[in-house]
Amino acid sequence: MRKLILFLFLAVAAAFSQAPASKAPASQAKVLSRVELDKLLETPDKVLLIDVRRPDEITANGGFAVYLSIQNGDLEKHLSEIPKDRLIVTVSNHAARGGKAADLLASKGFKVAGTVGAQTYESEGGKLVKIAVPAQKEK
């Protein structure tokens, strides 16, 4: 009986440990660490950060000092405005939307270094710029 229980336990554990083979990765883009991004930012004339988050997310979570803001849903409409001579890093909160944006840009011939999550970057010790929303004037 013990052998049967042990066998069932091992079979169940093996079944749960296997990832489905048909599930495709969310993105082909490299997720950059804080160290990797900081290294790229040492040459600001060669890299372009494209932040695909909504403005309220950038305000709430912080962002980078210099970036191009194009939300993910609008990216394809603005391809002609993105320089092709720069290495591109896409930014989102945790790199999921940024990865999708990076894949789109790479498929359109842009040089993409990868993607970064702003909150992940900050949790690894990186410094984000916090944007204070101006107070509304009373009417």
Image: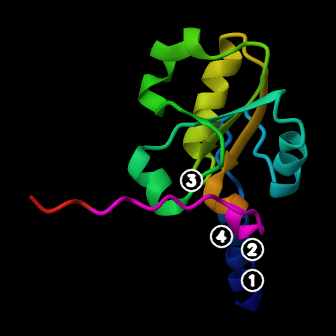
Residue stretch in magenta: 122-135
Outermost residue, bottom side: 2
Q: Earlier in the sequence, mark 3 or mark 2?
A: 2
Residue beneath the point at 73% across and 16% down: 110
On the image, numbered disc 2 is attached to which residue? 10
Amino acid identity at mark 3: Asn
Numbered tag placed on residue 12 in the rendering? 4
Q: Marks 4 and 1: in contact by CB < 8 Å?
A: no
Say whether residue 17 is visible.
Answer: no
**Majority secondary structure of magenta residues:** loop
Q: Please identify the quadrant where the C terminus is shown.
A: bottom left
Q: Please identify the quadrant where the N terminus is shown.
A: bottom right
Q: Position of residue 15 (x, y in %)?
A: 67, 61
Give the structural element (helix, strand or loop) at label 2. Answer: helix
Numbered tag placed on residue 93 in the rendering? 3
- The residue carrying pointer 2 sits among few (fewer than 14), some (14 to 19) or many (20 or more) residues within 10 Å by Cα, namely few
On the image, numbered disc 1 is attached to which residue? 6
Q: Marks 2 and 3: in contact by CB < 8 Å?
A: no
Q: Earlier in the sequence, mark 1 or mark 4?
A: 1
Q: Is residue 43 above or below residue 87?
A: below
Task: Work out how far the residue at label 3 is from the one at label 2, CA to CA, in angstroms.
Answer: 38 Å
